[in-house]
Amino acid sequence: MSKPIVKILASKNIVSLVKRSLGSPVFQNLYATVDGEEKDILQGGRFSCAFFISAILRQLELIKKGHAGVAGLEKDMIESGWQKIDKPILGSIVFYDPAPNSEDELCPEGHPHVGIYMGNDTVISNSTEERVPVEHHWTYDGTRKITAIYTHPEK
């Protein structure tokens, strides 16, 4: 009897993991030293979007490591074979320009954002205000500029 061929269904697993993460505080904190001083660089979930998305993608081995920043996550995704697409599909990753009034000492140019497309015009991403993953319209009702959308060939 031959061994069964098992192929992980990345897209289904991304959606499943992300849905079960809604409202979870697990992605709120990441401690580091900054100029020798210990800090929660995610500020209690205020800046957790890249950490949240990279934790999901890393768990499914779709990127090389976890990230606290959006730019590092996007770079890792490109190096890991993710490809830009024009329109979101289930499980694709959506990147946004920095939000107005989102400046922070660790991100003086403003804080870009990232989420996972869940279908039906929705994205789940970490909310700066609620500090947990929430579901929202994928375009933020036109208030945020989308800078890139990626999919992975193994999805």
Image (spheres, grey):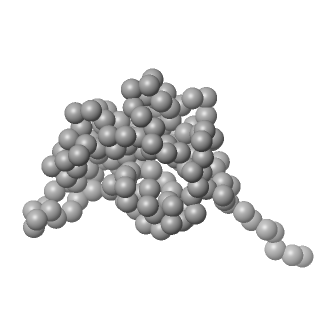
Specify the quadrant that holds the N terminus.
Answer: bottom right
Taking 6 as reference, is 94 left or right?
left
**Is residue 143 at least partly visible in the picture?**
yes
Q: Residue at x 45, y 42 (%)?
A: 147
Residue found at the very far bottom of the displayed protein: 1
| Rendered image quadrant of residue 141 | top left
112 relative to 8, above or below: above
Q: Where is residue 22 in the image (x, y as percent from the top left)?
A: 45, 38
From the viewer's perspective, tell me whether residue 148 is left or right of residue 11: left
- For the question of whether residue 59 can be seen, the reply is no
Residue at 45%, 63% (x, y): give it: 76
How far across and down, in percent of the image, does residue 106 sit? 19, 52
Which quarter shows the C terminus?
A: bottom right
Instruction: Report the residue that reaches farthest toward the top.
Output: 141
**Number of marks drawn:** 0
Q: In this view, does 1 lie to the left or right of 104?
A: right
Vertical arrangement, residue 40 with respect to residue 3, above or below: above
Residue 37, percent from left and from top: 9, 62
